[in-house]
Image (cartoon, rainbow, N blue to C red):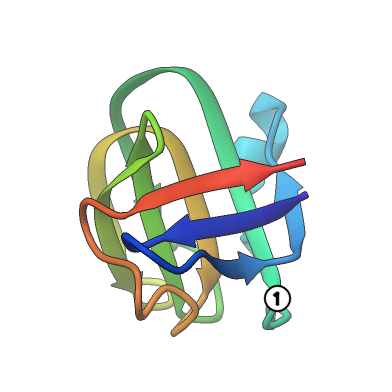
Amino acid sequence: MRLVFDPGGDREVLATDVETADSLASQVRGLTFRRSIPDDYALAFRFATARTRDVHMLFVFVPIDVVWVVDGVVRRVERLRPWRGYAREEADLIVELPAGAAATVDVGDRLVLEE
């Protein structure tokens, strides 16, 4: 699986190593206790419906970029700091990436997981 975004012309692969947090336990665990994240890695949280969803950085030791998506369209992009970061937005897909990986992603861009 890979994570691809389309800013309105050229498609760009953001991550080729995509892990999905499908269970409640994996969603709660997220990236907690990880000391590093590979450059081509993404953790994706897929949900059946769009609603306001939180991301916290408690026990996350590295900064990350978080992207909230509804129906394939980016709603918010935020860099969160270790331990103190917190943000919320409506989403049916949330993607967590290494800090800087989503630097070129903007609200309104298309972002999809491809098998």
In the depicted view, which residue is nearer to us: 47 or 34?
47
Give neighbour class at mark 1: few <14, some 14-19, many 20+ (Cα, 10 Å).
Answer: some
Residue 98 spot, x, y in % from top left: 55, 77
- Extreme-front residue of the structure: 9
Q: Amino acid at mark 1?
A: Asp
Residue at horizontal 28%, vertical 62%? 77
Q: Could you say where residue 60 lies in the image, as x and y percent from the top left?
A: 54, 69
Quadrant containing the C terminus in the rendered view: top right
Tell me residue 96's x, y (percent). 52, 59
Q: In which image quadrant can residue 46 be found? A: top right
Q: Is residue 62 above or below residue 71?
A: below
Q: Nearer the viewer, residue 61 or 50?
A: 50
Q: In the rendered image, which quarter is residue 80 located in?
A: bottom left
Measured from the top left, where is residue 70 in percent x and y? 33, 32
* Left or right of residue 44, residue 102 in this image: left
- Residue at the location (49% across, 78% down)? 101
In the drawing, does residue 17 fall left or right of residue 56? right
Residue plotted at (45% across, 50% down): 111
Residue at 51% x, 23% y is 47
The residue indicated by pointer 1 is 40
Name the secondary structure under disc 1: loop
Q: Is residue 28 visible?
A: no
* Location of residue 24 by image quarter: top right
